[in-house]
Amino acid sequence: MRILTGLAIGEGIARGKAKIYRHAPLVVERKRIAKAQVKRELGLLDRAVQRALAALERQKADQMEGEALAILESHLLMVQDPTYIASIRKLIEERLINAAWATEEVTEEIIRTLEASDDEAFRQRTVDIGDIGRTIVENLYGKSAQSSLVLDEPVILLADTLLPSELFGLDRSNILGLSLDGGGLASHVAILARGLDIPTVIETQLASHVAEDGDDVIIDGIRGEVIIRADHQAVRTVTERYEAYLAHEAELLAGAGMEARTGDGKRILIQSNIQTLGELPFAEAEGSDGIGLFRTEFFFMERSALPSEEEQFLGYKEVLERVAPRSVTIRTIDLGGDKVVSGLNLEEENPVLGFRAIRFCLEHEEIFLTQLRAILRASAFGNAKIMFPMISGIGELKETLRLLETAKGRLKEEGVDFDPDLQVGTMIEVPSAALITDLILRHVDFISIGTNDLIQYTIAVDRNNRKIAHLYQPLHPGVLRLLKHVVDRAHGMGKCVAVCGEMASDPHHAVVLVGLGVDELSMGPHALLKLRKIIRSIDLSAAQSLVDDLLTMDSSEKTEQAVREWMHERFDDLTIR
């Protein structure tokens, strides 16, 4: 028996025969060509792109919905991106190289740019652009872009990695469970696996090399284990674990329609963070109280041209109508730095501290005004709120609000309806903004704390830098005191405080936020049920006492240990894992 551990992303347990799939490297022939051959290579490229598009359109028509449809549409946009294709054509014409080589060069350059991003979601898009490039090259060689992997019976699939195009091409009803040697939480395959309810473990490193075709394999999507050739005792243990898991899930689902109210009466709104329409069904199924963060920059990514006002309006309108009467907090674009849009020349050496978010918007007023108009128009169709990211001072905020008023004025002149009482808020994710919370709240209706950035800016640590990632400590005494300052200042002015960073979705951290006085928690849909149960199981007074103790401590080690002990006294492992 062999047990390998990884990250559990598709909860549940599955057992079956192993099917091993490992990718053979695609060898691209690199040839110099004569000028007379350029026209031929360009023609080959055009036909390969058209075949790739046709294959994607067939998959899109195959009754896809939700995240699967959104991912396929993003792939279609990438294949049709004129900047991408033009770059390939330029290399063919200027360097006199064959189409396959040029495709490889351009694709690898985009991958290098994405790999340098500080945003995990964008780093994971390297798989998608690599998938697109590989598909075009295979079509150039006249090969089928379909995977050689065929599943004609139910199996446990163990792969080194799996491309989105490969997963789309499989009979997914025959995937009992999935194990990937690599992957990432934000990868499209991980997102698809969660949506398909396939027990999945990623980042196992070696599972596809340890197992053999036909081996008896158990995928434990609860604990993140891949058990190969399990003995009798292991099977019994996993079965008991699964029965406990099912009972736990039934209990969570029973609470989906209940308010998240502490034992002593404090109501906490439990809302969802989303970035695509495909995530709405998951949020609705988990009983979300609304959308606390709608990331709009994904309207702008993975495309060659900026979205029009009408396109944005229709997207925002659909979300608002589907979520109504609950509220949707629409965050304006956080572009720049590591979130690069084709043609805008946003690359820079230190993107996290650079030209991004509201700084980008104030420099590109017409892009910003277009988005503001779209949000305002959509506000007439639901309960909308607007929120500005990365505000660092009052000057930025006043200029931002001036542009919002400009957009409102133009719509009034045109006779276009919008909600005149639209609530306006800002993110608090920069220490300078946290320290002047009271000054900011003189100008806006609410604030939402972006803990991811606020923590790394406060401690001066890049959590994606492996050398110092251990210093990224959400319960650092300095972070806790800064959060308390923000909440106290806001409540002193009668204003609501939300948190939409990762702290909100972590059970240990969420109870601390409740104890600090946070009014709303917004998180990925997967965490809603668990956090609702936790909040309903505690008293606000007990959480406040915990926070009072934490604020006397002088190290993260002490605060983390205190919270762990507090949680283990009250909850089982399934609830707080």
Image (cartoon, helix red, strand yellow):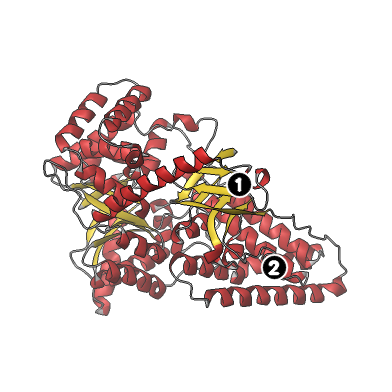
Any mark on residue 409, and which?
Answer: none
Q: Residue 503: x, y in percent?
A: 34, 41
Where 330 sits versus 235, above or below?
below
Q: Is residue 194 visible?
A: yes
Helix, strand or loop for disc 1: loop
As shown in the figure, which amino acid type bears the numbered disc 1?
Answer: Asp
Question: Mark 1 highlights which residue?
Answer: 181
Q: CB under 8 Å between callouts 1 and 2?
A: no
Residue 347: give x, y in percent of width and height.
56, 51
Residue depth check, mark 1 versus mark 2: number of the one nearer the observer: 1
CA distance for labels 1 and 2? 25 Å
Residue at 27% across / 74% down in the picture?
411
Picture quarter with the C terminus: top left
- The residue under label 2 is which amino acid type? Ile
Q: Earlier in the sequence, mark 1 or mark 2?
A: 2
Viewer-side residue, 470 vs 156: 156
Viewport quadrant of the N terminus: top right
Residue 156 left/right relative to 94: left
Residue bearing the label numbered 2:
136
Helix or strand or loop: what does disc 2 sit on? Answer: helix
Few, some or many residues within 10 Å of mark 2 (<14, 14–19, 20+): many
Label 1, residues with CA under 10 Å away: few <14, some 14-19, many ≥20: many
Task: State whether residue 454 is above or below residue 371.
Answer: above
Which quadrant of the view contains residue 151? bottom right
**Does 132 sit above or below residue 433?**
below
Which residue appears farthest toward the front when viewing the image? 232
Q: Quadrant of residue 404?
A: bottom left
Which of the two residues, 238 or 222, is positioned nearer the viewer here? 238
> Residue 337: in sight, yes or no?
no
Q: Nearer the viewer, residue 17 or 545?
A: 17
